[in-house]
Image: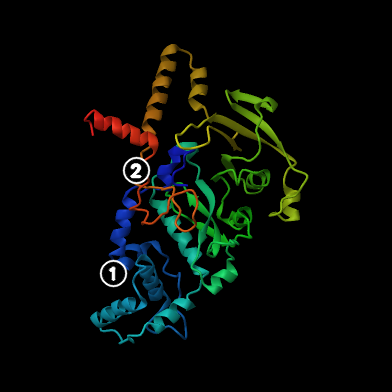
């Protein structure tokens, strides 16, 4: 999602910090427990982990949460290092003396309620949206993006039972988890995540995130979500608009109306076969047909196979406010003023570059045609392509490099 080759103007919203992310992460990792809580504490609701009646002594839920967060930011740190920090803090504040063993800390981590973590994630995303600058595109309506992926987990018996790995005959495999994340394009934060094993489809996980969408939102998705059941459910049940690619073939010759070049209104009909991830009641509630807008345009980018992209959306209004105003202008002078204002508005809506993030085409575990990822991603560098090597050779011959 962060590269967004088809939506380059939205990348600044998905990775708002750009190349500063690695620097900020190194800075946060150097924090102590007190500094970490002072920095991130205002973003977390104070009632997230209420006090436990019988077991809260030294390792309260709130203190255990921050200790676990610090340890996750420093994966090489052991539980004993967390205990040492707590011992020093208690000694400084004349608190109780705690055991040097980390067993109590590990048991306290196991007792943390998992249901509170999604609430904390939603609270941080809401706080990030509150301080982010308002968006001017699409009349300022809330923009959210949906995407799915799969990640590997540590190879433990518990993970293998809950998240069965792929069946590979001659290669080692790891437990795999399928995730679907909802992004806020206002701040780039993630308000909600759904997870499951590979036997659960992305659409089924997406169905569990529908409560995170509100009427008036605009959802962006790839072709995995550009299907009739998803779009119809969003528009007619939740009053949420959709923009994205689709798996259906769009033929402009069968359009309802031509809005502009490669810009049409089309009619989609409901399939006779019900969707597997919707209940019978939800499928029956979907309309028999709906009108969508399809926009087709070139998308040539070196290194990518896609040469043309077709988007479908439930936003049927072209939103050409200036063209309507210029059509109503009574003089050439007024039309020239409107044209100048349009150019000024377009020039003010900048799309900043977001350098610094690298996505090397290399495999970390499974061997395939890509090179082996044998270094951390921040240190890994791709082998220069043939055209780049030829260009550098010409520059060296000319003495420019």
Counting labels gives 2
The foreground one among 111 and 157 is: 157
| 267 or 240: nearer the viewer | 267
Q: Residues within 10 Å of mark 2 (few under 14, many from 20)?
A: few
Compared with 190, 157 (above or below) is below
The residue that label 2 is drawn on is: 355
Question: Residue 152, how many percent across, how many down?
Answer: 50, 62
Q: Please tell me whether residue 70 is drawn above or below residue 86 in the rendered image.
A: above
Cα gap from disc 1 to disc 2, whole angstroms = 30 Å
Question: Dot 1 corresponds to which residue?
Answer: 32
Can residue 306 be seen here? The reply is: yes
- How packed is label 1: few (under 14 Cα within 10 Å), some, or many (20 or more)? some
Indicate the position of residue 187 as horizontal and vertical percent values.
42, 49
**Residue 136, position as x, y percentages in the image:** 44, 38
- On the image, the x and y values in percent for residue 61 come to 43, 76
Name the residue at 30% across, 34% down. 392
Extreme residue toward the left, this view: 399
Identify the image's colour scheme: rainbow, by chain, secondary structure or one colour: rainbow
Residue displayed at 45% across by 60% down: 123
Outermost residue to the front: 170
Callout 2 secondary element? loop
**Element at badge 1?**
loop
Between label 1 and label 2, give the one nearer the viewer.
2
Disc nearer the start of the sequence (1/2) = 1
């Amino acid at each position: 999602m962060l590269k967004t080759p088809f939506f380059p103007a939205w990348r600044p919203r998905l990775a708002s910090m750009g190349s500063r992310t690695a620097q900020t992460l190194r800075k946060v990792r150097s924090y102590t427990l007190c500094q970490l809580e002072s920095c991130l504490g205002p973003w977390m609701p104070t009632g997230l982990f209420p006090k436990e009646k019988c077991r809260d002594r030294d390792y309260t839920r709130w203190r255990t949460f921050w200790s676990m967060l610090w340890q996750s930011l420093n994966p090489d740190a052991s539980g004993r290092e967390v205990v040492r920090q707590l011992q020093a803090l208690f000694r400084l504040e004349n608190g109780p003396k705690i055991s040097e063993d980390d067993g109590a800390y590990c048991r306290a981590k196991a007792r943390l309620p998992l249901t509170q973590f999604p609430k904390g994630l939603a609270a941080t995303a809401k706080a990030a949206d509150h301080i982010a600058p308002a968006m001017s595109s699409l009349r300022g309506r809330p923009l959210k993006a949906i995407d799915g992926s799969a990640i590997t987990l540590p190879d433990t018996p518990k993970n293998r039972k809950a998240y069965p790995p792929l069946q590979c005959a001659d290669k080692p495999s790891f437990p795999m988890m399928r995730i679907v994340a909802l992004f806020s394009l206002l701040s780039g934060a993630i308000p909600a995540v759904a997870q499951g094993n590979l036997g659960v489809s992305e659409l089924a996980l997406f169905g569990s995130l529908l409560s995170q969408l509100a009427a008036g939102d605009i959802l962006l998705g790839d072709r995995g979500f550009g299907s009739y059941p998803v779009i119809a459910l969003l528009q007619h049940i939740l009053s949420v608009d959709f923009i994205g690619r689709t798996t259906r073939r769009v033929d402009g010759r069968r359009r309802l109306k031509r809005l502009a070049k490669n810009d049409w209104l089309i009619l989609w009909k409901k399939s006779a076969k019900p969707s597997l991830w919707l209940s019978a009641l939800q499928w029956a509630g979907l309309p028999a047909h709906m009108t969508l807008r399809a926009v087709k345009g070139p998308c040539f980018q070196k290194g990518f196979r896609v040469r043309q992209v077709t988007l479908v959306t439930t936003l049927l209004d072209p939103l050409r406010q200036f063209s309507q105003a210029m059509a109503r202008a009574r003089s050439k002078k007024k039309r020239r003023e409107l044209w100048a204002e349009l150019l000024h508005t377009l020039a003010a809506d900048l799309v900043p570059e977001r350098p610094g993030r690298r996505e090397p085409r290399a495999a970390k575990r499974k061997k395939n045609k890509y090179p082996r990822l044998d270094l951390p991603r921040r240190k890994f560098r791709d082998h220069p392509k043939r055209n780049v090597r030829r260009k550098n050779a010409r520059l060296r011959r000319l003495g420019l490099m």
